Image (cartoon, helix red, strand yellow):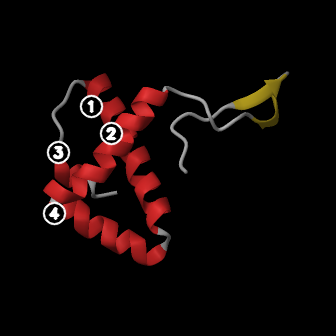
Amino acid sequence: MAELVACTRESAGRVKGVGGRKIGNAHLKWAFSEAASLMPRSFPAAKSWMQRQSQKRDVKKTHAILEAKIGRTVYHLWRKQVAFDPKKFLAS
């Protein structure tokens, strides 16, 4: 699954390794997972995006990518205080 938060171990400016995968807020992870499950049902552009991505990789991986994409989008929308733009969301 794609990580929303990267956890690296550093000492004196050198990267010593990568931390565990179970970091971040579990409730937000659940909410983004639910949003990724429900989005293709009500948003036709997301459904077609999922179908295109599923041709390249596994369905679970595609779902995880959509979860992370939603998480990053929510963060930036909240930080910049702007409205959701579906064209920008699926453009990248």
Residue 76, by quadrant, is top left
Q: Mark 1 or 4, which is nearer the eye?
A: 4
Please say if the residues under marks 1 and 4 sit with CB atoms less than 8 Å apart. Answer: no
Distance CA(mark 1)–CA(mark 4) = 21 Å
The relative height of residue 25 versus residue 33 in the rendered view (above or below) is above
Distance CA(mark 3)–CA(mark 4) = 14 Å
Residue 87 badge? none
Please say if the residues under marks 1 and 3 sit with CB atoms less than 8 Å apart. Answer: no
Circle 4: residue type? Pro
Task: Residue 61: give x, y in percent of width and height.
Answer: 49, 60
Circle 1: residue type? Leu
Q: Mark 3 or 4, which is nearer the eye?
A: 4
Secondary structure beneath dot 4 equals helix
* Residue located 70% across and 35% down the image: 20
What residue is shown with label 3? 85
What residue is shown with label 2? 73
In terms of sequence position, does the residue under pointer 1 or pointer 3 come before the other?
Answer: 1
* Residue located 49% across and 26% down the image: 25
Task: Residue 65: give x, y in percent of width and height.
Answer: 44, 54
What residue is shown with label 4? 44
Secondary structure beneath dot 2 equals helix
Task: Residue 23: give x, y in percent of width and height.
Answer: 60, 30
Label 2 crowd bin: few (<14), some (14–19), many (20+), radius 10 Å = some
Distance CA(mark 2)–CA(mark 1) = 6 Å
What residue is shown with label 1? 77
The relative height of residue 11 versus residue 57 in the rendered view (above or below) is above
Label 4 crowd bin: few (<14), some (14–19), many (20+), radius 10 Å = few
